[in-house]
Image: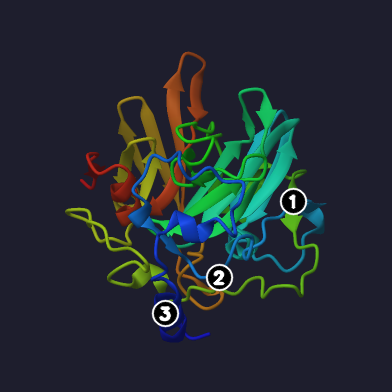
Amino acid sequence: MPMIIALMVLLLVSPALADPLAWKGEWPRTDFTRYSIDYKEIRSGGPPKDGIPAIDRPHFVNVSAVRGLPGTEPVIGLKLNGDARAYPLRILMWHEIVNDTVGTTPVAVTFCPLCNSGIVFDRRLEGRELDFGTTGKLRHSDLVMYDRQTESWWQQFVGEGIVGKMTGKKLKILPARLESFDQFRKRHPFGKVLVPENPRARDYGRNAYAGYDTLDRPWLYDGEMPDGIEPLARVVAVGDRAWSLALIREKGQLTDGDFRLRWNPGQNSALDSKTIAEGRDVGSVVVEMRRAEGWQDVPYHVAFAFAFHAFHPDAKITTR
């Protein structure tokens, strides 16, 4: 679908009223009397509940057996207790959530295309194991997830419950890297890679949001824009701190206090060309923190500046 047609479709389906009473039919188990946000900020992204289907039984192959995944395509690389797995954005683009168990740790690997945010969460919370699906709703253009145990709604960008029984609860974010498949393969030659259960079910490898990351304004967002940086410029976010990807790319390596951020070329933008493998090279960033035992990976994600500003309005984005 050409970009302009896709945009028109999204704009046509988006103005659904934020009315919890109207949502009750689809969400009978959700406690809408408990919430931490303004319901006016919730809007439809188009698909209904689970219209973008999460992956609950992920299939993997060994790195050496992967076929048809170009080395420059982006993956979320995760290693826990010796278990290394890669989740290609060509798959997450169409599913947004993978419920998995890595090295005995239950995880939710998530990706919101409209914010470019790929975040991995520990699915354990207060002695219970959750699994997640998509609500079909957005807030500040970011994915609103739900847990199937309580049908509470969660904000993907910050991993926080915003509606229902889990309001105010926070999921633990795990260290993972947004990197090229080649970079993952070099780090973990015996790792595993997520593959589609049915390769023909979706047009895997195609970017459904062609040209999105070069627009002047994001879709389905009417909030305040950040100062001193383009809304769809990439930033590297660690909690409520962020650095411009362009700055890290220019310097190659940036040390800021206890953080070290390193940029390397060779990763396609997933949100540029119609085919992900043809997307421009935006490179990869490794974020580490200085600890007593040396530099160690910390949780981070590469997001668009407007989204970081929406969820951290008082935070400064370091651009120089």
Q: Are marks 2 and 1 in contact (CB under 8 Å)?
A: no
Between disc 1 and disc 3, the foreground one is 3
Give coordinates of residue 307: x percent, y percent.
Answer: 35, 53
- The kind of secondary structure element at disc 1 is loop
Q: Which residue occupies 67% across, 56% down?
A: 54
Q: Is residue 288 left or right of residue 207?
A: left
Q: CA separation, marks 1 and 3?
A: 31 Å
Q: Is residue 39 above or below residue 286?
A: below
Q: Earlier in the sequence, mark 3 or mark 2?
A: 3
225 or 277, which is in the foreground? 225
Q: Is residue 125 left or right of residue 219?
A: right
Q: Which residue occupies 45% across, 86% down?
A: 5
According to the picture, the residue beneath numbered tag 2 turns out to be 276
According to the picture, the residue beneath numbered tag 3 turns out to be 12
Q: Quadrant of residue 96?
A: bottom right
Q: Are marks 3 and 2 in contact (CB under 8 Å)?
A: no
According to the picture, the residue beneath numbered tag 1 turns out to be 56
Q: Which residue occupies 30% across, 56% down?
A: 306
Give coordinates of residue 158: x percent, y percent.
Answer: 44, 41
| Amino acid marked by disc 1 | Asp
Residue at far top of view: 292
Q: Quadrant of residue 111?
A: bottom right
| Amino acid marked by disc 3 | Leu
